[in-house]
Amino acid sequence: MKKLLLIIPLFFIFSCEKEIPTLPDPCENSVEIVEEKIKGGSILQTWQLADAFYNLQLKEKTNANWIALTPLISINKSGENTPSKPYKFPTHDEVYKMHEIIKNVRLNGIENIMIKPLTAFWSVDGGHYWVDFHVKSEEEWEEIEAAYEEFYYGFAELSVIYPEFKLLSIGNELKEFSRRRPAFFSRLAKRIKTDFPNLKLTYSSNWDEFSHVEFWGDLDYIGVNSYFPLINKKTPSVEDVEKGYAPVKEKLQEFSCTYQKPVLFTEYGFRSIDYAAWKHWELPEFSDNVNFEAQNNGYIGFYNTFWEEDWMHGGFFWEWYFGSIPDENKTTWIVNNKPVEEIIKNVYKN
């Protein structure tokens, strides 16, 4: 979980033991990935693409071959006139806008799209962050789930029209929701895969959530938002970052072989700020403590740790910005016009 600021291959044979006895002897063979790695960038300003064409420059400046569209969308209370559906996402309006967005992405020469809605439930739980969202009664869970399923199915239907739309994340950092209602997510994934077999599916788990998700077997990728607290240093070295990632890598590798699914980093990145590789949620939203070296070393340590692993299918850095970049961009997640942009470009060119 991060604060939302608006602004070659090595083939391993390894064994899985302990903690995840989900499948018997699943690791006799490594998870081989034949397709090209996903080299993606994330865009939070998704809905601006519905209103006008923007030259994103994502492909030109970073060599990205994928884009993650991450619209922030809230569930609403339907009102007294629809008692059978007390909650509803604005599915029709959001899908309508997504038609225009995908067309503008096409014009930017990007041929691979993941749609990863950031679903919020503020009207239900009084404004709490979606990581903690939950309700108490079975009746309310079923009402929420009916609206949620209608919403994601509506997005999945776009894959019939747009072959560029190849991957859907059926949730983002819904730690309590996914823990309490795994059967629902499993059922949703199976329905979408049955009706849209060409559409790949993942779920974007928070860094401290992925090991508790029970429905990875129903998805194509184990999705992880990689904001792990790695090293408590103002400017960690590349070696510090790699050391911090070592136990994370071991755990993710174990999950990959257990479920025989590749890991996909549905988000990864570091801010250009002091202590960028530690508990970012404790950092100020804006700061004068600009630290490009901390950001650079974080990215290099990430790539050195994961990028050549055959069980890792790639990822989407957070985040790419288009239009006039705000002054406070200096210490945020945005990579545009920072030294890290060249680091990403060099990794993505291969």
Image (cartoon, rainbow, N blue to C red):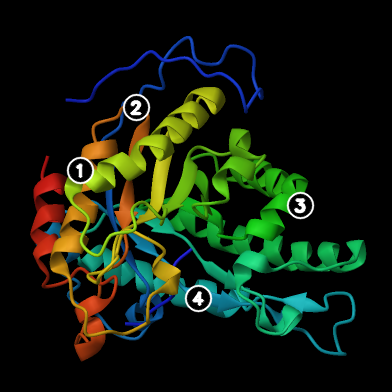
Report crowding for label 1: few under 14, some 14 to 19, many 20 or more residues within 10 A (C-alpha): some
Q: CA distance from mark 1 to mark 2?
A: 27 Å
* Number of the label disc, if any, that sits on residue 181: 3
Q: CA distance from mark 2 to mark 3?
A: 30 Å
| Marks 1 and 2 in Cβ contact (< 8 Å) | no
| Marks 4 and 1 in Cβ contact (< 8 Å) | no
Residue 27 seen from this side: yes
Report crowding for label 4: few under 14, some 14 to 19, many 20 or more residues within 10 A (C-alpha): some
Q: Amino acid at mark 1?
A: Glu
- Among the 4 quarters of the image, the one containing residue 345: bottom left
**SS of the residue at dot 4?**
strand
Please name the residue that numbered disc 2 is placed on.
33
* Horizontal side, residue 123 vs residue 67: left or right: right
Which callout, 4 or 2, points at the residue further toward the start of the chain? 2
Which callout, 4 or 1, points at the residue further toward the start of the chain? 4
* Horizontal side, residue 113 vs residue 236: left or right: right
Q: CA distance from mark 1 to mark 3?
A: 39 Å
* Depth order, front residue of 286/307: 286
In this rendering, the label closer to the viewer, 2 or 3: 3
